[in-house]
Each structure stands twice: as structure tokens, then as C-alpha cells.
Amino acid sequence: MSAPTLTSTRPDPSAPGAALTQRRSRPGDLAFRLAMQACLVVAFGVLTGLLTWVLIKGWNRLDSRLWTEMPTGLTSRLDGAGVQSALVGTLWIISLVAVICLPIGILSAIYLEEYADNTRWYNRLLELNIQNLAGVPSIIFGILGLGIIARALGFGFTITTAAIVLSLLVLPVVIIATREAIRAVPQSIRQASYALGATKWQTVSRQVLPSAVPGIATGSILALSRAIGEAAPLIVLGAVTFITFNPNGLDSAYTALPIQIFTFITRPQAEFTELAAGAIVLLLAIVLAMNSIAIFVRNRFEKRW
Amino acid sequence: MHPDREAYLVNRNVLSRRVLAGVALAALALTGCGSDTDGDTAGSGEALSGEVKVDGSSTVAPLSEAAASFYGEEAGQPGVNVSVGTSGTGGGFEKFCKGETDISDASRPIKDEEKAACEAAGIQYKELIVANDALTVVVNKENTWADCLTVDQLKKIWEPNSKVASWNQVDPSFPNEPLELFGAGTDSGTFDYFTDEINGEEGASRTDYTASENDNVTVQGVAGTKGGLGYFGFTYFEENADKLKALKVDGGEGCVEPSLETAQSNAYKPLSRPLFIYVSDSGAKKPQVADFVTFYIESIDDIVKEAKFVPLTEEQKSTLKSEFDALKASI
């Protein structure tokens, strides 16, 4: 059964019936290849189109004004306006998310992968929950954050609330990525470590974790990039839309780049749209930079067994 | 004498001299203040600090943002941080009546249930009219047939379950051009106001139209559809007058064009409307909020001009001043 299939995939003109099989599979082959190329063209074309459009729109605003100047409410002075408060707000939020989310996420993953007994119902429930949380729409996290973190726990409409909610939002992503990275470390490494008399914690901290760092770092950075672009939960969480000072503490009011872009494009004056386009390019540049770091880390530190 | 004791005496001397100087300075400052208290509470030189939280209508937000920008530049209070949110009129009142904001922007008066919520939370407030607006009904530039619509015709178009689908159903003299509707999202005060004035009941509207909180969507929709019709604040029409045509509205006394003058004089009936800010008593008790509101009201002309809104009439301005004085007296 397997022999004819093998020969038919190999271009062997001497084999009986080979020419026939090839001719028969050719239209399907071609159609599939064309479909794939069409998909690529659509995806790439849309992306290029969007980028070009944003670049053209925001070209006049792509200079240092963007990050050195604050937004203004004065239509006569829009020329000197920028998005500094939103940029600094975004950097604050993302740093806080990293501080809150990465330790919890990585430690949870280590527990689930190395310590948890997967035959126990509560561990399986935990796993199921994490998988499900990864698929919950971000606005739901926003509403939850508004009710519990901002109001019930009294964190208010502060930058801390935003960071906590975004941390919860990307936590499943960090946990799943970290677990994948830990799982990719071969069992033989652990066994060798135990054979040399190492304890469980010594094995995890000195063998498994260092080997898993590239995967963990990549997953974490990609999770943070996702948090950077989130606007929906922040709108619910009372991110303000106009602020001319940078966050000055954990209980500060704040805005973020996606929010600022979102409000700029609803304004009637054309200058706001231009400024929004500039801010979009800035946000894209940040996300691109973070993803490049992720790729660099992965390529530089990746281990092969 | 023990050296420590000597140092102590010297220090005490210095200390008492410092105290004296301080008292003298304070006295000077006090007399200084006394001499220029007349009307100059904004930027009185006393360094204030803290946050001023404004939230609410996205229609009114540009006005509060202009006020905040001016305040930051001219009031000489770098320690005061003003932030403006745009949760919508309803969303703004929800926060306002929980005591989470100091000032609420509103494009319609506070509703009874919102009043009740404020009362339940013990939040007292003052309503101030800060600008005017003309809700403008716009159509496509290529629309040559319609120039003026009566309120009844608008109601026929927008009332709940309306089946009007083409222009000749609005008026038999209009061509058989499909009618495409664009309008405000249900969270906005603009929607509440329009439905109240046109359909006679707040929130009552047909639902098969393109609703958006983003008025630029309405601009693009109407500009791109020959039979399009939409409505939004006057500023959006002014900024897009080259792409759109504003309809006159007949409120029973003939067709009136929306403009600065007709909005001010309320001749553009029934769609000219006042825009409000609500200041809570607890907010006004904070010196930085009081200072900001004082500045807002004293510079209202410049602010309205910068934000490109319809200014207040002289009468409205004097009402605003007296209302604000009443607010200051009550705290």
C-alpha cells in the first residue's frame, strides 16, 4: 500500500503510471499553491497598505515634537502638540505589567510543569482555567477590573489598576509560553541532574530554568507587546483622554497611546488625525522594537539538543 | 559654658530670628492678599497642588481640554494637574455621582435617575452652562433636492420603527433616492438630546442606522453616500463644510439655518442646545478645583473661541457668573 504512494510522489518517469498520476495531481497542486500565494498577498498587501497610509498621513508629525510635547486642547496650537503623556503612560504601564505579571506567570508555570501532580482534579481544573482565560475578550477583564480592582478594592482610576488588569490579561499567555519552554527541556537533563545528587529545586533552578530562558523571554516579551496595544480595558478603567502631565506615581491618573489615538481620530480637526497617525507609527515602532528583542533573544540564546 | 549649651543658645537665637522673620513675611503676605482680593482668586499666587478630575461628554471635552491647556499655560499653577476623560455624558455622571470626579461635562441636563444617584451618595452639585451648540442635520453635497426639513419630517425619518427608506417617502417632491442614515451612538448626550427634541422621547429612535460614537464616521458616511443623512454637533459641520451640506430646520416658525447666531439666539429651534459642566460641592471645596473652575469661567470667551464652540450670550454669561458666585458662597 505504501510503496505505490511513495513512488508516485517521486518524479520517476520510468515507473508505470507515474506520468498519469502526476498529470492528475497537477491542477489541484497548482490551485493550492495559488490559494496560498493569494493568502500571502492579501495579508501582506493589507499590512503594507495600512503602513503606507499611516506613514503618509502622519509624515509631517514624525519628529521629536511627538515625544517632547504634551497634547493640547487649543486648536490654534495643535502644531506644537505631541503625545508625551501618552507615551510615558504606556511605558509606565508596561513596566508595571512586567513587574507584576512576569514573576507570577513564570512561577505558576514552574509549579504546573515541575511540581503539580497532573492526576489531581484541582490541578487539571487550574490548567483548564488558564487555557480558557487566554481566550477571554479583553473588555471582560476591563469590566472585572472596574468592579473589583478599581471600585471594590479601592485602587481607583489609577495607573496601578491599569497595570494589574493588563497583567491579569496577559498572565495566561506568559504561563502557557513558559510551560512550553520548560517542557522543551529534555527529560534527560533533569535525570542527569538527579543522578548527580541534585535536589529538585537545584535541578529546576540550575538546569531547567537557564535552558528555558530563551523561550520564556520570547513569550514574555510577546505578551507585553500585546498588553501595549490594548485599549478596550483601559477605556473601561477610566484612562483619561486628555492629560498634560506624565504619571507621577502609582496612584496617578494616566493615559496611554492606544487611548490617545482613539480619541484623536474622533476629533473634527484634521490636525488631530495627523497627530493620531504619528502616534500610530510611534506605537508600531515600540511594538516592533520589543518583538525584535524577542527574536534576538531567541536566536542568541536558543539551545539545541 | 559647655560648648553644646553655647551652640544651643546660638541656634535658639537663629531660630527665634527665623520665626520672627517668618511671622513678618506672613503678615506681609496677608496684607498683600488683602489688598488684591477683589476678583483675583484665579492665580492668586498661592501655590496650589493636586488633581482636578474632569470626565463626561465627548462633545464638551474639547472645551474642558482647551480650558485645561490655557490653565496650564497661564494660571501659574504647575502643581495642579487637570485630567479630562470622555466617558460620555451618562458615563460621566455615573462617576460624578460616586464622587470619583470633581467636574462632569454634559451635553444634556442631568436626568432624574442620575439626580437620585447623586443624592443617594450625598453628592451636591451646581449646573453651569458654558457654551452653546447647534445639532446640525447634514446631507451629501450632491443632494440638490432637500434644503430644509420640518421637525415632523425629521420625526418621520427617525422615529422608532420608521419604515422610511427613500427620500420621496419624506416628501413626494424629492427623488426616489435611497436614504442612508448615520447618527450618534446611544451612550452620547447628543443622541439623548436629538431623540428627545425630534421624537419626543429621550432614547426613542429607529435602530436600523449606522450608529457611532465617533462623529467622523458620520462625516465620512454622509460625504460618501448621495442619499446620506446624519446629525452631530456644529463644530463637526464647520470643520467639514467643504464636504457636507447642512439642512435648515423648521421648528414651526419657518426654516432656520444652523449658525453661531441662530444657535446663540435659540432661533435654530429645536436643535440648538446648551452645553454644561457640573461642579460638585465636594470638588469645589478643594482649592485647586475652585481655582480651575474660577479660571474656566473667567476665561470662558477665549476657551470657547479656541475650542471653536458657539459662545454664550451676554445674558448667559451673567447667569454663569452669578451661579458660580452662589456656588462659591455655598462652600
Image: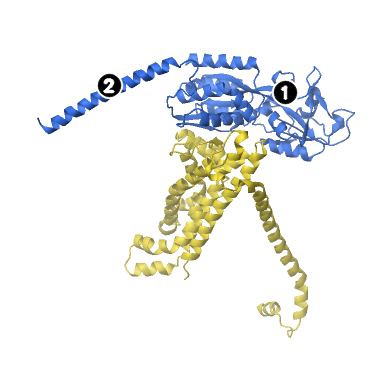
Chain colours: A yellow, B blue
The x and y percentages for residue A301 are 46, 65
The secondary structure type at the circle numbered 2 is: helix
Q: In the rendered image, which quarter contains the N terminus of chain A? A: bottom right
**Above-or-below relation of B74 to A227:** above
The x and y percentages for residue B264 are 69, 20
Q: What residue is rendered at 60% in x and 14% in y? A: B318
Q: Earlier in the sequence, mark 1 or mark 2?
A: 2
Tag 1 subunit? B
Residue A43, image quadrant: bottom right
**Above-or-below relation of A170 to B61:** below
Counting the numbered discs, the total is 2
Amino acid type for the residue under numbered disc 1: Leu
Q: What residue is rendered at 56% in x and 52% in y? A: A285
Tag of residue B271: 1
Relative side of A247 to B255, left or right: left
Amino acid type for the residue under numbered disc 2: Leu
Tag of residue B20: 2
Q: Nearer the viewer, mark 1 or mark 2?
A: 2
**Observer-nearest of A58 and B202:** A58
Q: Residues within 10 Å of mark 2 (few under 14, many from 20)?
A: few
The answer to whether mark 1 and mark 2 are in CB contact below 8 A is no
Tag 2 subunit? B
Q: What residue is rendered at 67% in x and 53% in y? A: A52
The secondary structure type at the circle numbered 1 is: loop
Q: Residues within 10 Å of mark 1 (few under 14, many from 20)?
A: many
Relative side of A12 to B32, left or right: right
